[in-house]
Amino acid sequence: MTILTTTSTRVKGVDALRGLAAIAVFICHIGGYWGFLDLPGKVPQLVAAGAHGVDVFIVISGFCLALPLAGHRRALRVPQFYGRRAWRILPPYYVALALAAVLALLPATWHLTVARQASFSDVLLHLMTGQAWVPGEVGTINGSLWSVALEVQLYALLPLLVLAWRRWGIVPVLVGAVALDLAWRFTGALGGPAPLGSDLVVPARLDQFVAGMACAVAIRAGLAWSTRRSLITFALATLVALSTSTLNLGVVTGITWAAAGASAVLLLAGPIGHTLGGTALELFGARSFSFYLLHQPVLLVLAPAVAALPGGTPTQLVLGGSLALAITVLGAEVLFRAVEMPSHRAGRRRFPHTVAPAERRQPRTDPTTEPIPV
C-alpha cells in the first residue's frame, strides 16, 4: 500500500521532496537570472515551471505541521507553537537577509543583485516579513525571501485552521480555501488594486497549505492506494499543473499545483518514500531551507563571470551552473550547521510541547452508557 497509517511525526522521503523542489527553483532562477543563456525551443518555459517548487514547499509545510495533530484529538499549544516556529525559521532567514542586504545596499555591489539600490526602509520591511504585501518591494533585497514571509502568515493562521478543521472537518476547510484562492485571483484579474490578486500572499496560497494538512489526515486515517495508482495520480496532477502554468491560466494555477504537491506527498507515504529516505537527496533536502535562502544572491553575483565564459550556452550552463550549485551547497551547509540547526534545537528546548497529549475517551455520568469522545 502507498498510504500507510503512521504514529510518527515524520514521513520518510519528505525531505527528499523538499530537495527536489529546491533544485527546481534553482534551475528556474538560472533561466530567469542568466538572461545571456540562449536556451532552445520550449526549454525556457519548462525551466520557468521550476518556480512551482515553492508551491510544493507550502504543501509540505501544511503536511508536516498537521501530522502531529491528525489522527487524535490533540490540541495545538499556540504560544509554544509560535515560539518554536520563530526559532525554527527566523534566525537563518535574518542571516540570509543580512548577507543579501549588504549586497543590495553597497554602492559597489547593488547593481549585481537588485534593480535599484536598496534603502533601510526596504530592510526594515523585510525584517518584519511584510515585503509581499507592498507592490514592488519583493525584489528589493532578495526576491526569494517572499516565501518565508508567506510561511509566517500561514503559521499565524494555523490555530484558526485547526479550530475550523476540528469543527467542520478538513474537506470543508479545503473547499473554503480553494474558493478563497479563486475569488482572490479572479478579483485581481479584473483589475483590482495591488496586492489584490497577488499570488505571493495568503489568500492565493492557503489552499496549498490546507492541501498538505489534508494529506496528513489521509495518512493518519490509513487511506490505502496502490503504488501504481499513486504514480498515475501524481503524473496526471503534475501534467495538469504544468499545462495551466504553460497556458498562463493564473486563476487555477495555484489549485492545480496544490493537487500536484499533495499527490507527491501521498506518493511518499509508502515504499517510494522509504527508498528515498535513505538517499543523499534526503540529506540535501534537510538543508534545502538554507540552500533556498542563499541561492539567488549566488546566481546573481556569479552572472557576469559566467556570461564571460567562452563556448556559449553549453559551457556557461554546465560550468557556471555547476559552480553556482557548488557554492550554494557549501554556503547552505555552513548556514545549516552554524545557524539553522542550533536555532532549531534551541527552539525545541525553549518550547518543548507544541502539541498537547491526545484526548482520551471519557465515560458519561451514567455508567451504563458507552464512552464518548470529549
Image: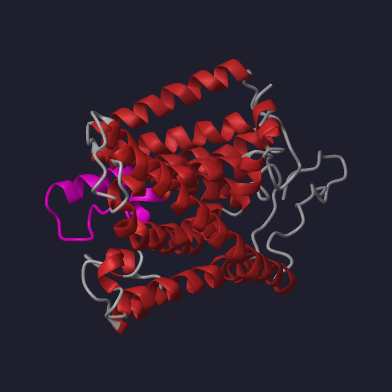
Q: Nearer the viewer, residue 327 or 9?
A: 327
Q: Nearer the viewer, residue 132 or 333?
A: 333
Residue placed at 23% from the left, 48% from the top? 36
Look at the image and tell me whether residue 272 can be seen.
yes
Outermost front residue: 310
Q: Position of residue 248 (x, y in %)?
A: 22, 36
Outermost bottom residue: 120
Q: In the shown orientation, is residue 261 left or right of residue 140?
A: right
Outermost left residue: 191
Chain part drawn in magenta: 179-205
Q: Position of residue 241 (x, y in %)?
A: 36, 31
Q: Is residue 183 magenta?
A: yes
Quadrant of residue 271 within the rendered picture: top right
Q: Is residue 329 magenta?
A: no
Q: Nearer the viewer, residue 295 or 301?
A: 301
Q: Nearer the viewer, residue 79 or 119?
A: 119
Residue placed at 41% from the left, 60% from the top? 298
Quadrant of residue 269 within the rendered picture: top right
Residue placed at 67% from the left, 57% from the top? 75
Does 190 sit above or below residue 139? above
Q: In the shown orientation, is residue 40 left or right of residue 89?
A: left
All told, the count of numbered labels is 0
Q: Position of residue 168 (x, y in %)?
A: 52, 44
